[in-house]
Every structure is written in structure tokens, then in C-alpha cells.
Amino acid sequence: MLWKTFRWAFAVTALGLAAGVLYDGWTALGIVAILSVLEISLSFDNAVINAGILKKMNAFWQKIFLTVGIVIAVFGMRLVFPVVIVAVSARLSPWSAVHLALTDKDRYQELVTDAHPSIAAFGGMFLLMIFLDFVFEDREIKWLGWLERPLARLGSVDMLSVCIALIVLLVSAVTFGAHAHQHGGTHADKAETVLLAGVAGLITYMVVGGLSEFFEQRLEDEEEREQEAEEKARRAGRRDAPVKLAGKAAFFMFLYLEVLDASFSFDGVIGAFAITNDIVLMALGLGIGAMYVRSLTVYLVRQGTLDDYVYLEHGAHYAIGALSLILLVTIQYQINEVVTGLVGVVLIGASFWSSVRRNRALRTAA
């Protein structure tokens, strides 16, 4: 199972490292390897969240996620996205941005860094909405009951997550503008851009998530009938496979996964500039990392890990909440990527250990 799931990730690793050596010698191999580890550590929570969504989809769409999806993830977010950032922020054509990336790496990095506030606002708002919608929902299984019970009660207030997200964005934009103005920075006039980027992130979440829910809702009657059939089969001693999303519902869920992956990759792309400003090495390293994240997602689904370790999804969502706040803070303050990665690992590790303890307690009680 392990080899079958990760074989493409292993193959891409070998090709990526070899390409790095051919491109710029053994030093490049080290940089590519470091970037791969950076991407995996920053995106582990992404794999857990993706697995929670992917397990609802049928085998065809899971395959699409691993093929078409990985092309979008690697080439779209890890190669094209940094170029688009520079093209838009510097008002250059895409070809000019690519030429700049290959010939004037310092200027290229400067332009990407200049665009970071808008990127952080968009990604931070998208991820914050995921976290808020999770904690405001009343769930049967609760990890941190003392916190999740009152939050679930608050969740009965309509549009509360949207209101809180907009307040956080407004505070971030105003603080950013005031801070830049006080220090005479060049970003003083970009508070409005940050605000617009954050609203765009919020709208993207609501549109993609809303379309997914709309088509999922349309399948409810069919799913209920299937569940009744499953119940009858269970009574007869058979165990049928659960209903999987297909058609339009799965398509919009796939789009949601891609936007989610894009939001998670912001910190990896920006963090990569702390290691190298070479776009080729960046694409190779982050691309390898993205392959492992995708393969890990499928592995979690096929192994049923989220069903066995019930708090993992909670830990991943808390990691998302932390990452969203970190992204918003990085609009005006620099935070080391090691801190960002460790926060996610610690929260997911804690939720995994809590799941293990729960399973032990249930076995003892039985």
C-alpha cells in the first residue's frame, strides 16, 4: 500500500533531484531537498484536511485529484503563481516576468516580497473562514470540549464566521496602513489593496464552498435512500461501501480542494524565498513536496486514518486557524517559517496522541 501510494512521489523526487544537479550542480540538489522538506512540513495539515474532503469523493475524482490536481498544484501554484505575482505587482507581461526571474533574481524576489501583503490577506482570509466554520459547527465528537462546546453554541448566530473574519481583516488592513505610514514605508498606500485581497479571499471561499454545498445538498435524498439500503444490508449481514460524491458535486468539491491547496501553498512559496530566489530550484523543491502531500492525502483516505484517529481533523483545523493568523500577522511582521511549520506539527501531533489515548480508553472500557 505504501509503495503503491507514494511511487509517483518517489519517482518525482528522483527526477527533481537529478534535474537540480544538472541545472546548478550539487549545491542545487541540497537546496531542492531543503525546499521539499519545507513544503511537506508546512503542508502536513493540508493533507489531513484534504483527506477529510477526498474520502467523500468517488474513485474517479480521487484519481483526478492525483493527476490533473497535481499538475495544477505543481505547475500552477509553485511555478506560475510566483511569476503571476511579479507580473501583476510590477505591471509586466508574463514573459517579461519569466525573463526577470531568470536574469535578475534579486529584483524578482523584491517584487514578490512587495506583493506579499496582498497574498497573505487573500490566503489568510480563506483559511480563517475554514477554521471558523469548523469550530462554530456543533459536532458529535469534540477534542477540546471546554472550548468547542461554547463555540458551537455561538455558531447558531447567522453569518457569525463572516462577521468575525471581516473584523479581523479590517483590523489587519488598518493596522498595516497605520504601521507603514508611521515608519514612512512604501506600503502606506496599500492598506486598501490588502482589504480588497482579503475580501476576494472571503468571496472565493463562499462561492466555491457554497457551490459544493449546493450540489451536495441535491444528493441528500439519494444518499438517504442509499443509507436505508445500507442499513437493510447491514441487518442482513452485508456491509456495502458508503455513497461517494460524483458529477457536479464532486467537481465543485475538487475546485474547493484546489483553492484550499493554493491557500496552503502561499506560506511555502513565500517561505521558499528565504532559501533561494531561483525560480527553477523553487519549482523543483516545492513540486516534490507537493507530490508527497498529495500522496499522503490519498494514503490517509485509503487507510481510513481519519476514522481511526478521530481528533486528527480537529488538530488540522486548529493548525489552519493558527496558519491563517500567522499569514495575517506577516502582512507587516516577519515570522520564521520554522515557527509556522512547528505550530502545525505540534497541533496535529497533540490531536493524534489524544486520538490514541481515546482509542485505548475505549478498548479498556470494552
Image (cartoon, rainbow, N blue to C red):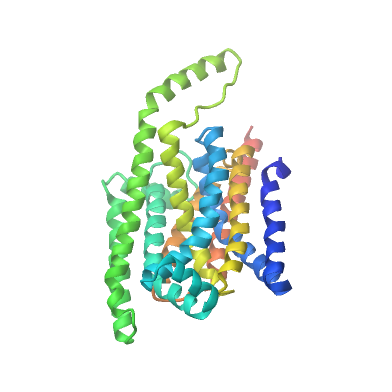
Where is residue 136 shown, x and y percent of the image?
Answer: 36, 48
**In the foreground, 229 or 247:** 247
In the image, what residue occupies the spot 63% across and 46% down? 356
**Residue farthest along the top direction in this orientation:** 236
Please, is residue 273 above or below residue 77 in the view?
Answer: below
Please, is residue 84 above or below residue 146 in the view?
Answer: below
Please, is residue 263 above or below residue 114 in the view?
Answer: above
Q: Quadrant of residue 18?
A: bottom right
- On the rendered image, what quadrant is the N terminus found in? top right
In the image, what residue occupies the spot 36% across and 50% down? 205
- The reply, left or right, for residue 122 in relation to residue 351 is left
Where is residue 327 shown, x and y percent of the image?
Answer: 43, 66
Disc tally is 0
Q: Is residue 201 visible?
A: yes
**In the foreground, 309 or 144:** 309
In the image, what residue occupies the spot 30% across and 79% down? 188
**In the foreground, 29 or 170:** 29
- On the rendered image, what quadrant is the C terminus found in? top right
